[in-house]
Image: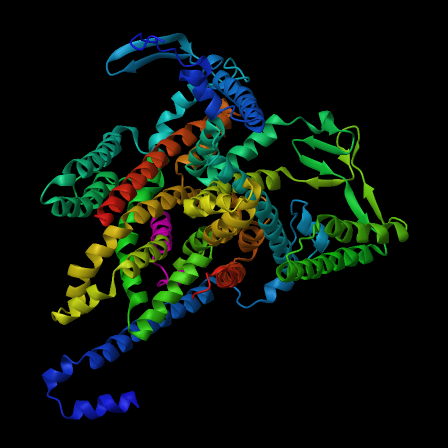
Amino acid sequence: MKQQNILSQVKNLTFREILYNNEVRAFFFQVATFLLIFGLFYTIIGNLFDNIEARGIHTGFSFLKNRAGFDILPFLGNYLQDYTPESSNLTVFYVGLINTLIVAFVGIIVTTFLGLFIGIARLSNNYLIAKLAGGYIELFRNIPVLLQIFFWYNIFINIFPHPKKSLSFFDVVFLNQRGLYLPKPILENGFLLVIIAFVVGIILTVFMKRYFNKKHDETGVHTRTLGYSTLLILGLPAVFFLLLGSPLHFDFAVLGKFNLKGGMQVVPEFIALTFALSVYTATYIAEAIRSGIEAVDKGQKEAAAAIGLTQTQSLKLIVLPQALRVAIPPTINQYLNLTKNSSLATAIGYPELMSAFGGTVLNQVGQAVEILGMAMLVYLVISLCISFLLNVVNKRMAIPER
Amino acid sequence: MAVNELQSTRKPPISQIGAILWLRTNLFSSWTNGLLTLASLYLLYIAIPPLLDWMFLSANFNFGTVNILGFDIKFSEVMANNDNCGREAACWPFIYEKFYMFTYGFYPREEVWRPDVFYGLTALLIVIVRLVRNYKYKNRVILTMIVAYPIVSYVLIAGGFGLLPVVQTHLWGGLLLTLIIASVGIVVSFPIGVVLALGRQSDLRVIKLFSTIFIEFIRAVPLITILFMASFVLPLFLESGTNFDKLLRALIAIALFQAAYFAEVVRGGLQAIPKGQYEAADAIGLSYFKKNALIILPQALKISIPNIVGSSISLFKDTTLVLIIGLLDMLAMVNMTSQDIHWLGRETEGYVTVTIVFWVILYSMSRYSRKLEIRFNTENEN
């Protein structure tokens, strides 16, 4: 319809008028841009195929089925995928993915608590605490995170003792330069039921909270639910656990002559990486929390005090809900940054996606386009998921317009 | 009662004045606060003294005789080596011996005046930017410098053009390389970022689409994947036989990466400009180019300056990633020098030194950005 309009106009215009017509120009520019970008892609993809042929590089994804043939630092990914050098390159991809996700998961939990703590401490009326928190932020935010990873990794392997002289905590947890040794949980038949009971407990708690909230809104009677929630979330699985005859055992690490045997080894690469990423990201989260709390109008706190709320009530019911509205979006962005920064593990050899798959497999197979494409796709998907989460949160948090 | 008898004023109780009042209100206002104070003091007690001890008190400063500005200063008879340096505290002679590597990499010793002039120019640039703040033609001065600085620096460091002997890029390293990557990254990516931001705000759908895809894609993936792309895939994209410098590949990757981030910062500025400004520019018949160059961008860029500096800080931190594709920046030098068979196991000294250098640069940048933010904030309120 619009196109026809332009055409009918064009017929009645002089050449000069056509040249200066906004819509004609817009159309021309867009076509030109499209052709330029199309041409660029056409050339580079043509070159790519020429070069690949000239260098005898294979194409396609059949390399994923090939034998990997190298060892990977034993960590969660290996255990879950039963990785051996005989496994395929596709298994390496999964191992790397799992190792990336576990760093992101643990890092996000640690950094959230650390950031929350530092952010609140920054606003403390205790002079020393506020200054210490400020110093922490200024110190760790202004050091490149890769340098921090190297630094903590170096400290870890230098400061902790040789396996022979492992530090032991009640013979349950051991610490030496090869990492942290935790008891390895061994699940037996029926443990799944305990997990299901746990999930059911959480769901029931949510329903219960809704019920009592509704009751509170209607009648004004407030019910303390903490006891019931604990009972549902912890008690219910505990009952099942005992009924099924404790279907969970731990394999404890034992100090042998030269090394520790058994248990679950948490490699120093993981600890250094997660620690450095959490410490670094926490500085940004702390600033987000601080700006969130500072964004709450002073009048809100005064009004809360005026209607007789205690300090805790005022913080819980008035200040935090409003502060979180400001603080949560930047915090979620930092979660994404932490996940992306986990790819720096390449530098210390922790086998996550970019190190095991994007590094070692790439060096062996040489199919850079396919391998880097897969790795980028993973990060793209993670980032899309986090953007989606952010949108959902923003929508829920938005102040209802009146 | 004698009315005109003056009562001598009593002094306030000791707990209500001076240091004790300060302590009471700021450190011991309640039980929990007091406990927190004590806990923090303990934390400082276990952290600071060992650190000072390691860095200074027990550290080894046996540099031998050092010539500083023409004066011979004697620290010790001979310079310490790795064996008699001690393992319990810092061994600074290691840093002293490797100082050249940390600052210049493998740059030829006889050409070292060139990086020195480059460092001097960089410092001069910063001083001039601060001095001309209130000068009438400051925009012209700054623009000239932004154009001239990279050209002069390139001729100086790389040589060629029949002026200076050529120094291959694989010899560049240390702080020199870090500064080069950061400054080239910022200077090259900024114009691209502005164009992308305008593209994303454009009414032309095709241009908007391509800009948005580029920006969102780059922002979704880690810098390492782009560096790997540049070092493994980029050569395949070009005519076979094109020889491509490793540093140039890294610079392309960093410039494209940073451009996407600058674009989002500038877009934030563009969105903050009231719609009336656009409409007014259209109403007086300015072309798209003139509208943006004369009306929109000067205002939008001014608003976004603090965020531009903030984004540059991130870029400066990200330059360390180039070591993963084998470039020898300052951080890579730590790993390299501690492999020296004569100085094994001195990584910690290297990391601490590099940390201090990075921290000083980044902290000054972030202070500067905060200052700008405060300045622009007040200007907006008036």
Q: Tell me where the magenta segment starts and ends, as one range.
A: B236-257
- Left or right of A309 on screen, residue B22: left
- Left or right of A272 on screen, residue A394: left
Query: Is residue B288 among what the camera can see?
Result: yes
- Magenta segment, prevailing SS (helix, strand or loop): helix
Query: Is residue A66 among what the camera can see?
Result: no
In the depicted structure, whether residue B261 falls above or below residue B6: below
Q: Position of residue B9 (x, y in %)?
A: 35, 11
- Left or right of B36 on screen, residue B17: left
In the depicted structure, whether residue A301 falls above or below residue B96: below
Q: Where is residue A391 in the image (x, y as percent from the top left)?
A: 49, 63
In the depicted structure, whether residue A94 falls above or below residue A150: below
> In the depicted view, which residue is nearer to us: A218 or B98?
A218
- Quadrant where the N terminus of chain B is found in the figure: top left
The residue most toward the front is: B1
Colour convention: rainbow
Q: Does the magenta stretch include residue B255?
A: yes
The number of callouts visible is 0
Q: Position of residue A348 (x, y in %)?
A: 55, 41
> What residue sits 43% from the left and 31% below the top?
B355
> What residue sits 55% from the left and 32% below the top?
A154
> In the depicted view, which residue is nearer to us: A384 or A267?
A384
Q: Toward which corner of the image does residue A131 lie, by quadrant?
A: top left
In the depicted structure, whether residue A364 falls above or below residue A116: below
- Left or right of A41 on screen, residue A225: right
Q: Is residue A330 magenta?
A: no
Q: Where is residue B171 in the image (x, y as percent from the top left)?
A: 34, 38
> What residue sits 29% from the left and 14% below the top?
B67
